[in-house]
Every structure is written in C-alpha cells, then in structure tokens.
Image: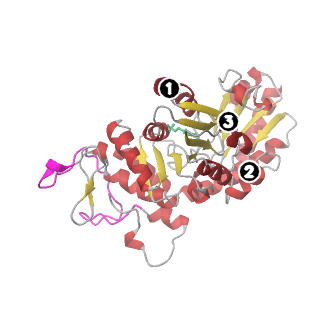
Amino acid sequence: MGDIAMSKRKFGRELGFHTRAVHTGNDIDKETGAIRRPITMANSYALPYDPSDLNWSSAGGDDDSGAAQNLYTRNGGSNQQYLQEKLASLSNGEDCVVLGSGVAALSGLFFSLLQSGDHVVFSSVTYIAVYRLLNDLFKNKFKIETTIVDTSDLDAVRKAMRPNTRLVHIETPGNPTISIADIKAIAEITHSGGALLSVDNTFASPYNQRPLDLGADFSVESLTKYINGHGDSMGGAIIGKRELLDPIRSQAQVNLGGVISPFNAWLIMRGAVTLPLRMRQHNENAQRIAGYLESLPSVRFVSYPGLKSHKGHSIAVSQMSPGFGGVLSFGLKADHDTHNRFVSELKVITSAVSLGHDESLIVFLGEKDERQYLYPEEFHGGFFRFSVGLEDGEDLIADIEQALKKTAS
Ligand SMILES: *Cc1c(COP(=O)(O)O)cnc(C)c1O
C-alpha cells in the first residue's frame, strides 16, 4: 500500500486542515501529466512476473520500489487508496479503510473484531443499522453478548463493562436525538476494561471532531453524508491504527466484498476537498436555526449541542470545534398529522432521509420508531431530524416561518 503521507508537498511544516483537504491524496498523474489523478474504472491490474505467491486474501502488496501493487479492485483500487490517504490525514489517523457504505464500514468493523462469546456495549442512540446488527443479528446468529446504555451517562457505561467486553461503540452527536457522549472519558473506561472504543463521527465530520485525538481506537464515517456532501454517492470509512485495520481490510473488504466502486471513491474525493468550507456554513446555519426554533412558542423542544439548553453542551464544547455540525432535532406542540402538514408546506427544505447534503433535508420520525423507549420523554410525541444545508440562513428561516403559519391556520 502507498504510504499514508503527502510526500510531494512535505516541506517540514505541518499542513493545516484546509490544505490537506485540498491536496492530500491528489498528485500529478505520471502518465498524462494531468494535475488531477484520474478515475481508474478497471477491476483488474497487471500481475507481477511471478504471481504464484500472492496472498489473495490481502489488500495487495508492495512491489520492489515500495509502490502499491494492485491486483483486483475488490482487494483495493487506486481511487480507494487516494481517498484513504485524505481521510487518514483529516482524521489524524495512521491508516484508513474505505468501503462501499457507512453500514459496510460498521458491520465490517463488528464482523472483523468480534468472536462468539465477546461482549459489546453500545449507545442507546445510534444509527438504526447498528441497533439491528448488534441487538439482533450479531446477538442471535453469532452469540455476541450486547448491552445497550445511555452513553451520556458515564456511570452507566462503567457498570455495563464485563470481563469479556471487547468493544464499546458510541455515536456522538447521536442519530437521531443528537445526544452527546464524552469520548475522552469513555475511552478511559473502555481501555481500563481492556476493550476497544469505536466512535461513529458522521454527524460531526473530522472538521468538527477527531475521536482518535481523544483516545478512540476507531473513527467511523458514513462518507455518504458530510464528507461527500453532495448527495450523489455512498461510502464508509474506518480510520485508526494499521494493525487494527488490516483484519477489517482482508475480512470485510476482500472476503465479505464490501468494496467501494472507483467512481464513488472519486466523487467522494472530489466532495471532500470542500469539506471545511461546507462545514463552516452548516455549523453557522444550524446554530442560527436552532436558536430561532428555540424562540418559537409553537416549538416543543430543540436538541442541538450548540445550544446552552442541551444537556451535553459543555462536553460538546470541550470536544467539538469550531462548531457543532449541521443536524438538529425538534418537535412541535402539535399532533402527529400537523407535523406531516408542516413538512408538506416547506418550499426550500426537502422531505427526505440522509443528511449532510448541500440541500436541507428534513424527516419526520413518528411515534412508531421501534426505539422510542430508549429516547428521552420529549421525543416520544414524534419529532423531526433536520439536516441544515448550505442555503442562505434567511431563506431557511423564512421557509419554516411560512410553513408554520400555513400549518397553524
Ligand atoms: C447514514 C449513517 C450511517 C450509515 O451510512 P450509509 O452510508 O447510509 O450506509 C451510519 N452512521 C450514521 C451516524 C449515519 O448517519
């Protein structure tokens, strides 16, 4: 594998986040001289003189000059590698594995790390697939023990640890209630119990939060969201130490087949260049809209870590910077159908799942969500998850205002 470094542009100075977002993983194309690396839409690569001793369970190898030896795209491809270089750098990690979706990254991490008889502690607020994977599939198919805890409560995390705990998995800010967990404190609890900590960092993105700097062993990102940022491809990444990622690469990528397509890797690479600029606008718009919503008498509650009223505000301030991301949740003082009517009146904000796109997206999560029992009281009446986009803040506020007016009448 190519070294995760920006060899061409190293000049004895630590490069800033914006510079690395632009340059890391890109280079002059040796064949054409193009200043952008090309998309390589090949599934197979030329073999070395003697291919008989290649390990087809691994992700390629190095040739005599140390350059990456690609074999077959499921074992690793050039566009995937360029993106891995960029994401490792932006996350302050040694290495990165990019897979075909955020869920491929999460399930690949769990599959590679866990054995029957192991115990996993995970947040009561996580992406829905994590709940289904750990609370049902891994538990029932593979005899993995699981405990669900409110990871905003450190005592609850401490009490949940067992001698066979192998992994603690948290999400902060958490999807969909935007709960906050203290990464540094949980890393200490996890490590003193001899386990590893993975943090789903999708809502913050590496611009606002870098879990590895706070002691986590794995930082997981759904690239589908902020890192690609344009709503036009899917991908996932796990960033951490190489020795921990190598088994994920060979098991989840090569043998389970969760590989990313070269075209999606290229699109995400292109999107990631503007991550810091986009995140600044997401942070600013979300902070402003959270404050606006909180001031409205028709709003039941707003959950956004940048608000002083958020239970995890001070922890968020200590581990997130410069902002708190673009996703908030809120509910109206209204019944089920009024929530739907409000959404149907919106003109700029789109009703759709996903988040972290250029455009604002809203989704109504009704009372039938199977995990309502795990959420705080105020979420029980149904609520919105609102991914605040890059539009003008005034337009978003005007859109909410006109839709509320129509809904009330
Ligand atoms: C969307 C999401 C995922 C899953 O990512 P996909 O790319 O849709 O598979 C995982 N974690 C969080 C927090 C997400 O929002």
Say if residue 383 shows up in the picture: yes
**Residue found at x 65% / y 23%:** 370
Residue 407 in the image: state x and y as whole percent: 78, 27
**Residue found at x 65% / y 49%:** 189
Quarter in which the C terminus is drawn: top right
Residue for badge 3:
149
Q: Is residue 69 above or below residue 148?
A: below
Residue for badge 1:
137
Callout 2, which amino acid? Gln
Provide the residue span drawn in magenta.
25-54
Judging depth in this view, the residue of 212 and 89 nearest the camera is 212
Judging depth in this view, the residue of 147 and 33 nearest the camera is 147
Say if residue 151 shows up in the picture: no
Residue 241 in the image: state x and y as whole percent: 46, 56
Give how far apart the Cα atoms at labels 2 and 1 are: 38 Å
Reading the chain from its start, which is encountered first: label 2 or label 1?
A: 1
Quadrant in which ligand 1 is drawn: top right
The answer to whether mark 1 is within 8 Å of ligand 1 is no
